[in-house]
Image (cartoon, rainbow, N blue to C red):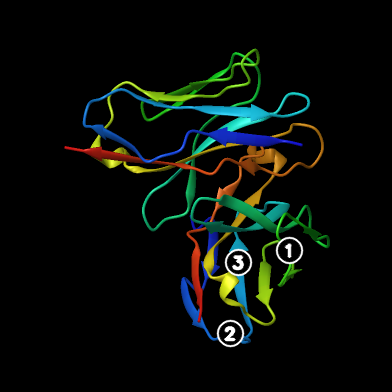
Amino acid sequence: GNSVTQMEGPVTLSEEAFLTINCTYTATGYPSLFWYVQYPGEGLQLLLKATKADDKGSNKGFEATYRKETTSFHLEKGSVQVSDSAVYFCALKKNTGFQKLVFGTGTRLLVSP
Amino acid sequence: NAGVTQTPKFQVLKTGQSMTLQCAQDMNHNSMYWYRQDPGMGLRLIYYSASEGTTDKGEVPNGYNVSRLNKREFSLRLESAAPSQTSVYFCASSDPDSGNTIYFGEGSWLTVV
C-alpha cells in the first residue's frame, strides 16, 4: 500500500541554520507529494506540493524536489527563523480517481534564537 | 474567507457520553474528511465523503459515525465515548478544481475522562 516515512524529531536548530527534513514514500504509480505545516494550536496548512517527477515545490523559503529515482521529497530551507518552529508533515495522494491523502507521522522543528 | 469551520474547539466528555463534532466548508468542495491526530502517529483518517450523499470508512472508523448532511456539512458522532478517543480531531475538504489540495479546519480538542 501507499505510505510515507519521515525522519523522527524533534529537529533542533539555531536561527539561520540550514534545514533538511527527510521524507520518503512508497506508492504504486505516480502520486502527488505535499508538505503541510502545523503551527502550535492550529490546523494543518499546505506549505508546498509537487505533482510529478522532478517538479520542485517552493513557498516561504522552503523547497522540496520530487525525486522519483529515490522516492523522496525532502524539505529544505536555507536559513530558518524562530517563527518556523512547527510540526511538518509529508504526505502523498495518488492522482487517479478519488484518492485519500496519506500522511507521515510528522517532524517537530524547534528553532532557537 | 472562513474555509473549513469546526465546532466545538474544546470538549470534555465522560466515558459513555455521546457528542457530535460539526464541520462546514464554504469552498464548494465535493470531498470532506475527518482525521484524528495522536502523538507519534500523525494523522489517521476516520471517515471520508467523496461526494455529497456518500460516506466511507477510513483507517480507524470504529466507535464513530458520520453524516454528510449536505454539500457543505459533514458531522462526526461519538455514540459512546471512550478514553481511547481522547484526541485532536480535524475536519478537511478538497476538490479536483482546487488541485486536490486538502484544506483543514483548526481542530477540535476532545478529552474523554
Give the chain letter at badge 3. Answer: B
Q: Nearer the viewer, residue A68 or A83?
A: A68
The answer as to whether the residues below labels 1 and 3 share one chain is yes
Where disc 1 sits, the SS reads loop
- Residue B15, numbered label: 2
Residue, disc 3: B23
Which mark lies nearer to you, 1 or 3? 1
Which mark lies nearer to you, 2 or 1? 2
Q: Nearer the viewer, residue A44 or B63?
A: B63
Where disc 3 sits, the SS reads strand
Give the Cα distance between marks 1 and 3. 17 Å
Q: Is residue B28 above or below residue A55?
A: below
Residue A107 location, x and y as percent?
44, 40
Residue shown at 69% from the left, 45% from the top: B95
First of labels 2, 1 by sequence position: 2
Residue B108 location, x and y as percent?
50, 67
> At label 3, which amino acid type do we have?
Cys
Give the Cα distance between marks 2 and 1. 18 Å
Q: Is residue A44 visible?
A: yes
First of labels 1, 3 by sequence position: 3
Q: Nearer the viewer, residue B110 or B26?
A: B110
Residue B11 location, x and y as percent?
48, 78
